[in-house]
Structures are given as structure tokens and as C-alpha cells.
Image (cartoon, helix red, strand yellow):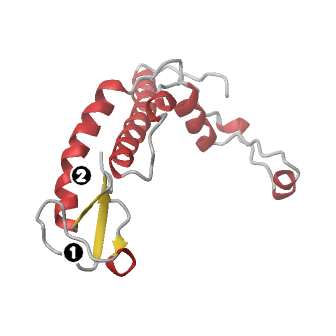
Amino acid sequence: MTMDILPTPWLIEELGPADCVICKKHITGEAYPIEEEWFCEQCAEACLADIQKEAIAFALEHCRITSPLHQFQEEYEYRCGHEEYELGCKESYTENSVRAFNRHCCTNYDDLIEGLDRFDATDHVFYVAIRERIDELVHGYHCSDNTEREKRGEEPERSAGP
């Protein structure tokens, strides 16, 4: 898993004088908010690296496929046009829409991210770890299952679209 773990920095000019909560040095340039305290970039990276390890372990342990995943069927691909979108008909059937359906309806993704604040640095790290793990599971399930079927000379498994 790879993720950008630093929260959006604040410019010291906007924030006012601040000292890093870990190294106690006066922060110049950019300050990073983590759990309502301010960190210099080096200390923020170190602090969030520990949180990232915890978040990845959490995601590996808790992320699950909860029901059969849908396979994208290219022959049924449909993208609504600009006029349809403007009229409120926003439904499309694309590879991305099937991935989103699988993420939200066939895994425990929504349960795991419920209550996370993506603007909180710690919650953001957990959110990204959960999202990346769910995406790995969904992608890996499709690829490994169908690769094995193809090796045996069978047709790839397809389920009905969402």
C-alpha cells in the first residue's frame, strides 16, 4: 500500500507562531495539524508513519468481501450523454461504476469508513488504508479467480451487472 500520509500543511503566516509538539522547535514555513496539535514536517512524517502501520494492519484484518462481486461486461457498457445528465438521468454502466458498486455493495467498506473524518489526519490515514485494501481485494478477486479459470480453459466468471 502506498499513500500520502501528511495532512495539508498550514502556512505559518496564516496560523501564527507555533512550536512543534515533539521536537519543540519553532516551526517556520509549514505546520502540520495532527490530532489538534502542530508538528514540523519531519515530526509529522514520523508520527504518521506509526499511525500508517496501525491503519494498514487494521485494514488487512478487517476489510472483507461480503457478497459475490459483479464482473464488468463490456458489451453492456453505457455512458449517459451531456443532455441526459442535465435532465437528471445520471446512470451509466462502466468499468468504474461496477468497481464502485462492488466497493460499496459487496464489501464492508462503508461500515469501516463510517464516522471517519477525512480532514482529521489520523482518520485520513485509516480511510486511505481501508480504501486501498478494499480496492486490492476487489481487483485481486477478479484477477486471480478469472486467471485460474482461463488457465483451465474455462470462460471467465461473469455475474449480472449492478
Q: Which residue is mark 2?
A: 48
Relative to 114, 94 lies left or right: right
> Is 59 placed left or right of 97 in the picture?
left
Q: Which residue is mark 1?
A: 27
**Label pair 1/2, CB-CB below 8 angstroms:** no
Q: Residue at x 64, y 33 (%)?
A: 73
Quarter of image, res 16? bottom left
Above or below, 133 against 80 in this view is: above
Q: Is residue 6 left or right of residue 117?
A: left
Quarter of the rendering occupied by the C terminus: top right
The residue positioned 48% from the left and 19% from the top of the image is: 66
- Relative height, residue 62 to residue 34 (above, below): above
Q: What's under tag 2, amino acid-wise?
A: Leu
Q: Nearer the viewer, residue 155 or 24?
A: 24
Q: Residues within 10 Å of mark 2 (few under 14, many from 20)?
A: many
* Place of residue 77 in the rendered image (x, y in percent of width and height, measured from the top left): 71, 41
